[in-house]
Amino acid sequence: MQLFTSIGMLSIPLLATELRASSLELGVIGAFGSATYAATVVFAGTLSDRFGRKRVIICGTLLTAVVLAFMPLSSTPVHLIFLNVSLGCSTAFFWPVLEAWLSDGASSEEVGKGLGGFNVSWSAGACLGPLMGGILYTRSSALALLLAAAGVCLVAYIAYQNKNVTAASPLISATKLDSIQIDQSTAEPIAGPTNGKSLLYAIWMANFTSWFVMSEIRMLFPKLGVDVLGMQPWVIGLLIFALGFSLTATFYLMGVSRLWRNSPRPLIFAQILIIVFLLAMTGSTSAVTLSIVFCGLGVGFGIAYSYSLYYSVVGSLEKGAGSGRHEMVLGMGAVLGPLLGGGVTEIFSTLRAPYILGAVLVFISLGAQLRIFSANRESALIRTSPRADAD
């Protein structure tokens, strides 16, 4: 699925640039689509809890194929705004539902392994999709988008043929975020019985800012590449491929390792990495340098996403709703990233302004997270102190 939607996601800003869309219009196209996605994912996940995963996924894939097939008919950026809104709505009925499907009836350890494999799978598609999309778009925009639509139809057929149908789940009103337990004999605990919610909020902050930045890149970088750096679509696709490749490698490492689940340090490191490479991006002009920057950003994005998805699903009795909340958070980042990034581009008249904005936002978010992690550590020390035991 991600392979084919990534072809479409690269084609949309390239087509909008051909239609002479401004940076702000590009931001609106990306933001409106992501806003629809963020507003729909929790409903879609909850709907699958009630009616079953397979039905919802098939509906979502078929709607996605229809939207992609109509995109080559666009003649103004306004057409792309409406179509991207429809695309955001249709894909919302796929991703959170699939995440919940993978975690149905599994233990937390099985969920960790399963979601690690899932992350590798979709990020591999996100890696190859832009590469294929850039090559196809160089030949014809219609060819790229129609191939993407045909591929999504194939995904719908595969889902239809799947015999592992999950029954509708009974709706459970309570979540168990506060029951996340970590082995205290290992590294620094990231969640405990009294502060699981606040720590989950900190993880969501990291995921929000990372997707804010990623969405800026996906929606706004093609215009920078074409108008300023003089790149061909296939070169832009190759750079997005580099980002996707490092994202995939990071997901694989996060999937086979358990150590990160016990400590916030990798999450903190990831955001420092994002800040450094965003600042480097503001002065980079060559494709080689940008490929290194994109690889570094992919590592940071992958770590933040892995934390958010794991704790959102493990910490919820309603898997569909839990994965929906995770997707809603990243969807909100995907809304504001292109919109605010496009806005600062128009204000400061430079196509590199969005990446400075992203670095500032990640820095502020990291400061807030450090306060939460520090409070959590002090709370853990109080709970394990001899005086606390005596009380």
Image: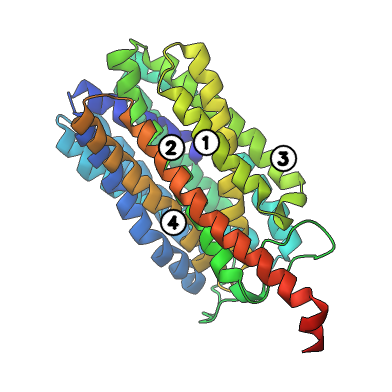
Q: Position of residue 345 (x, y in %)?
A: 25, 31
Amino acid type shown at disc 2: Ala
Among numbered discs 4 and 1, the one appearing first in the sequence: 1
Q: Nearer the viewer, residue 25 or 148?
A: 25
Q: Quadrant of residue 225?
A: top left
Inter-mark Cα distance, 1 to 2:
7 Å
> Is residue 134 toward the left or the right of residue 102 in the image?
left
Q: Which mark is residue 274?
A: 1
Dot 3 falls on a residue whose secondary structure is helix
Q: Residues within 10 Å of mark 1 (few under 14, many from 20)?
A: many
Mark whose residue sits in front, 4 or 2? 2
Among numbered discs 4 and 3, the one appearing first in the sequence: 3
Dot 2 falls on a residue whose secondary structure is helix
- Say if mark 4 contacts mark 1, CB within 8 Å: no
Q: Nearer the viewer, residue 254 or 10?
A: 254
Inter-mark Cα distance, 4 to 1:
18 Å
Amino acid type shown at disc 4: Val
- Say if mark 1 contacts mark 2, CB within 8 Å: yes
Among numbered discs 3 and 2, the one appearing first in the sequence: 3
Q: Which residue is mark 3?
A: 253
Mark whose residue sits in front, 1 or 3? 1
Q: Which mark is residue 359?
A: 2
- Say if mark 4 contacts mark 3, CB within 8 Å: no
Among numbered discs 1 and 2, the one appearing first in the sequence: 1
Inter-mark Cα distance, 4 to 2:
19 Å
Q: Which quadrant would the C terminus be assigned to in this image?
A: bottom right
Residue drawn at point x = 72 percent, y = 64 percent: 108
Among numbered discs 1 and 3, the one appearing first in the sequence: 3
Amino acid type shown at disc 3: Leu
**Residue 356 drawn above or below residue 188:** above
Dot 4 falls on a residue whose secondary structure is helix
Among numbered discs 4 and 2, the one appearing first in the sequence: 4
